[in-house]
Image (cartoon, coloured by chain):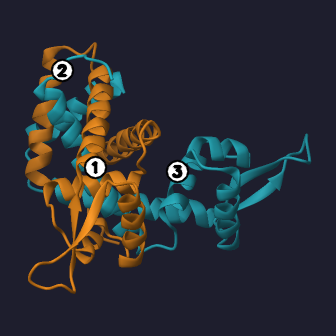
Chain colours: A orange, B cyan
Amino acid sequence: MSNKKINNKIVSIEKNFRQICCKIKQKGREILTDFEITPPQFTALLILLEEDNLTISELSNEMYLACSTVTDLLDRMEKNALLKRVKDENDRRISRIKVLEKGYTVLDEVLTARRLYISEIFEEATPEELEIVNQSFSVLNTYF
Amino acid sequence: MSNKKINNKIVSIEKNFRQICCKIKQKGREILTDFEITPPQFTALLILLEEDNLTISELSNEMYLACSTVTDLLDRMEKNALLKRVKDENDRRISRIKVLEKGYTVLDEVLTARRLYISEIFEEATPEELEIVNQSFSVLNTYF
């Protein structure tokens, strides 16, 4: 373990991140119970929204999960008509994942519910306070 | 779904939270691979650090997990000498969870590694930037 000095500001930032991420995660799970997808299915859809037509192996890498786990996940999502696997036109041995309309719809509904939650959280916040939160994200996005 | 107007600031806050929490979660998992505990074991130790002597049912509630899942988790942690179950003195039918020295040591080491990660992330940040991040947490802790 490095002997690098950890000051109180860092201790507090780590704790704050941990607690807020935990609250958002719990709320996110709660929100998903109103929809027909699970947390890893939501994560998969988010990744596929950014980059459609991924292979199973590419999606596994991005999810930090084993290919077999992602295969099971995709089986259930395909059964639920959220996506389908399509053979690559240039190499028929490769399957690519295509999100179906229902997948986009569910993802959109879940994101809307999450935004509503955030919007309710900040209902009483002043524009100045919201500005501080946004400025903080600019800092975070520079270093993370 | 409510028709409440969701402005772009909220859309951006939800996305920023999601992405930064995701990065911290991945890094947190990476850090844990250097230690002999899993992510749910880390969560359990964090809860027990705040409130020792919980019953299995109380811990299950706080972890949003089924009692049977938490029982399995505690079995492995007890085997690993991180904690032990102790009969309640007033009601011998109830077991309470007591964190052992090794549990506190591992938790402390993991927290130190997480703080080092955060400290490295902000190595190049100016004091003003760190101040914005801390101010933002004050806002967040008011509303979350």
Residue drawn at x 34%, y 28% is B141
Question: For the residue marked with disc 1, what is the amino acid?
Answer: Gly
The answer to whether dots 2 and 1 both sit on one chain is: yes
Mark 3 and mark 1: span between their CA atoms? Answer: 36 Å
Is residue B119 visible in the rendered image? The answer is: no
Find residue B46 and name its label: 3
Q: Earlier in the sequence, mark 2 or mark 1?
A: 1
Q: Which residue is mark 1?
A: A103
Give the alpha-carbon distance from disc 2 to disc 3, as whole Å. 30 Å
Describe the element under mark 1 as helix, strand or loop.
helix
Q: Are marks 2 and 3 in contact (CB under 8 Å)?
A: no
Q: Quadrant of the C terminus of chain B?
A: top left
Say which element carries label 2: helix
Secondary structure beneath dot 3 equals helix
Pinpoint residue B79: horizontal percent, then vertical percent. 70, 73
Q: Which residue matches tag 2?
A: A129
Q: Amino acid at mark 2?
A: Glu
Query: A12 and A103: which one is in front?
Result: A103
Q: Nearer the viewer, mark 3 or mark 1?
A: 1
